[in-house]
Amino acid sequence: MASSGLWALDYEVYGDVQGVFFRKYTEDQGKKLGVVGWVKNTPRGTVTGQVQGPKEKIEIMKNWLRNVGSPMSRIDRAVFSNEREISTLEFLNFTTKY
């Protein structure tokens, strides 16, 4: 079976990431990279979500979530889980969930 080259992963970002436009910047970054998925705040004060797309773009997004974020955010750590190859994208675009 040929590889589709599409990957998905879940993420959770810890630090000062709520109330600092982290979700908006994450959505903008996802759209800029051409990946799909979602982002939302959690009751724990973290930001969580899923990203799907070509492996190389997923790696760029992981680096962005781990090291960049929004200008006013402070990222303590980013945890990535459930990384897996997928056959087709499950989302049409990158959105913020409420």
Image (cartoon, rainbow, N blue to C red):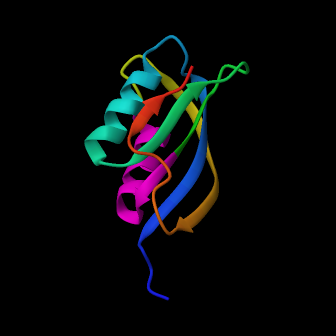
Q: Residue furthest right?
A: 44
Q: Please tell me whether residue 58 is drawn above or below residue 96 in the rendered image.
A: below
The residue at 56%/26% (across/down) is 40
Q: Which residues are magenta?
A: 51-68
- Report the label total: 0
Asked if residue 25 lies left or right of residue 65, the reply is left
The residue at 40%/42% (across/down) is 64
- Majority secondary structure of the magenta segment? helix
> Does the magenta-highlighted stretch encompass residue 67?
yes
Q: Position of residue 52 (x, y in %)?
A: 46, 53
Task: Give the position of the C terminus as an image quadrant.
Answer: top right
Q: Please tell me whether residue 66 is drawn above or below residue 96 in the rendered image.
A: below
Q: Residue furthest bottom?
A: 1
The residue at 50%/36% (across/down) is 38
The residue at 38%/41% (across/down) is 93
Asked if residue 74 lies left or right of residue 14, the reply is left
Asked if residue 5 lies left or right of residue 76, the reply is left
Asked if residue 63 lies left or right of residue 19, the reply is left
Q: Position of residue 26 (x, y in %)?
A: 41, 32
Q: Position of residue 89 (x, y in %)?
A: 45, 56
> Does the magenta-highlighted stretch encompass residue 79?
no
Q: Position of residue 56 (x, y in %)?
A: 36, 63
Q: Residue furthest top?
A: 19
Choose between 87 and 41: the one closer to the eye.
Answer: 87
